[in-house]
Amino acid sequence: MKNITIIGTGYVGLVTGAGMSEFGNKVTCADIDSKKIEGLNSGLIPIYEPGLEEVIKRNFENNRLFFSSDIEASIKKAEVVVIAVGTPQGENGMADLKFVDAVVDTISRNLNNYKVVCTKSTVPIGTGKNIVKKIYNKIQDKELFDYVSNPEFLREGSAIKDFLWPDRVIIGTDSDKAYKVMCDIYRPLYINKNPIAHTSVETAEMIKYASNSFLALKISYINEIANLCELLGADVHDVANAMGQDGRISDKFLHPGPGFGGSCFPKDLEALLAVSKNNGLKMKTVKAAIIANNNQKKRMTRKLLNLFDNDLNKRTISVLGLAFKANTDDIRESAAIDMIKFIIDHGGVVNAYDPIANNEMYKLFNDIHYYNNVYDSIKDADGIVIMTEWNEFRSLDFKRIKKYMRGNIILDTRNILNMNQLSEFGFIYDNVGRIKK
Ligand code: UGA
C-alpha cells in the first residue's frame, strides 16, 4: 500500500482519492483552493456523485484520506504524485494544459526523494513525453522519478463503482519499478482476476481518446439509425436490442437520445481531431460523430417546433431534466442548453425542473422559471420536453399531468415514457426513432 498525493480535488481527483484510499492506501488530496479544502475537512463534498460522500467519510475517519492546501508539503511526503487537474478545451480544439504545466513545475521543485509521477487527467497524446522532458530540465538527478500515464474511465453518476470495479486499469510506463508501484496501489483488484494492462505512455494516452471517441461514435451512429427508423417506420429500440445481442457490437451505448454531452466526449473528440490534424491525418469518423451530434441536438429542437406547428411564440414549455445525463448535476454541453435557447429564441417561455441541476442551469439562464418538482413546473404548460433520463420521469402520473397542463404535447428525447399511456391520455407526442402507438 502506498503513500499517495493527488493534486486537484475536482471530479477526477476526488473520486480517485476516495477510491485509492478505499483500496487501503494513504491518500492526501491537495488543492490550491483552500476554501474547498477547508470544506472537505469539515465534511462538505463539493460535487454530487452517488456513494462518494460515504467512501470519503469512511476513509477520512479511518485516517487513510486527508485534505491539504499545502501542495509542496503534500508532494514531498508522497511516494506517488497523481496529477488530476482540469484540462479545459483551448484554442483549435486542443486541450489547454496550463493547470497541468503549473503542477508539473511544482512537482519538479519538490522531488526530495524518488517518486512516481502519474497523470490521471485526460491529456493529449504526447503530453507524457513532454512532462518527462520538463521535469528533466529542472532536476539534476534523473533517477528521482518515473512517469506513468494512468487514464481514468469514470462515468459521472457511477464513478465510484467504475473506480472500485473497473473493466480495466491502464498503466502506461517505460519503468518496471513504477509499474510495480502502481500495481501495488490497485492490489485489491487482482485477487480474483487481473484487469491491469501494462502499456507504453503514448499507448495509454491513446487508449483513453480511442475509447471515448468510439463510444461517442456509437451514440452518433445509433442516433442516425433512429432518425432513419422514423422515416422508414422501424423501431430503433428493437434494432438496438438485436444489434446488441451480437457480441461483436455489444448492447452498451446504443441508446438513442438528444445527442451526447458532458465534459468529456465533446472535448475529447475535438482534441483527438486536433491532434490528428496536427499530424497531417484526417479522422473522418471522429469528425462525423461530432457533426452527427450537433445535428441531433438541432433535430430535437425542430421536433418541438413541428409539434407546435412551427409556432412557439408565448407557448410555455416545461423542460424536464437539465443535466447532460441522469445522476449528475453537471450541465456542461447538455442538450437541454440548446433546447432552452431555442425555445427562448422562438418567443417561448421556459419552466425548468431538474432534481439537482437547477442551480447549475441558473448560472447560464437566470431569467427562466425554475421549479422544485415536476408537477409545479408543468402547471399551465403547453408542452413538456424530457431532456434527461431521471428515474422519476419514467413513472410520471399522466392523469395528474393532463389535469395540470394547458396543452397536451410531449417530446420525449430520451425514450423513457410509455407510449401506450401517452396515447391513452390523449397526448400528442414524439420521441427518437420509435414506432408510435
Ligand atoms: C464518459 C465515459 O463514458 C467514461 O468512460 C470516461 O471516463 C469519461 O467520459 C471521461 O472521459 O472522463 P461521462 O461523460 O461521465 O463518461 O458520461 P457517459 O455515461 O459516457 O455519457 C456521455 C453522454 O452520452 C451523455 O450525454 C449521455 O446521455 C450520452 N449517451 C450515453 C447516450 O446518448 N446514449 C448512450 O447509449 C449512452
Image (spheres, grey):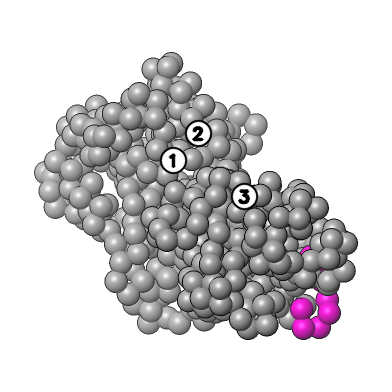
Q: CA distance from mark 1 to mark 3?
A: 26 Å
Question: Which residues are the magenta region?
Answer: 230-239
Q: Nearer the viewer, mark 2 or mark 3?
A: 3
Q: Is residue 44 left or right of residue 195?
A: left
Count neighbours of disc 2 (C-alpha within 10 A) and say few if under 14, some if 14 to 19, many if 20 or more.
many
Vertical side of 71 occupied by 63: above or below: above
Q: At label 2, which amino acid type do we have?
A: Leu
Q: Which mark is residue 52?
A: 2
Asked if residue 389 is positioned above or below residue 303 in the image, the reply reads: above
Residue 86 is marked as none
Residue displayed at 55% across by 33% down: 51
Label located before the other in sequence (1 or 3): 1
| Labels 1 & 2 near each other (Cβ < 8 A) | yes
Q: CA distance from mark 1 to mark 2?
A: 9 Å
As shown in the figure, which amino acid type bears the numbered disc 1?
A: Ile
Q: Residue at x 29, y 71 (%)?
A: 91
Nearer the camera: disc 1 or disc 3:
3
Secondary structure under the numbered disc 3 in the rendered image = helix
Instruction: State the residue in front, 116 or 363.
Output: 363
Quadrant of the rendering where the N terminus is positioned: top left
| Callout 2 secondary element | helix
Q: Quadrant of residue 279?
A: bottom left
Residue under label 1 = 47
Amino acid type, callout 3: Asp
Q: Quadrant of the C terminus?
A: bottom right
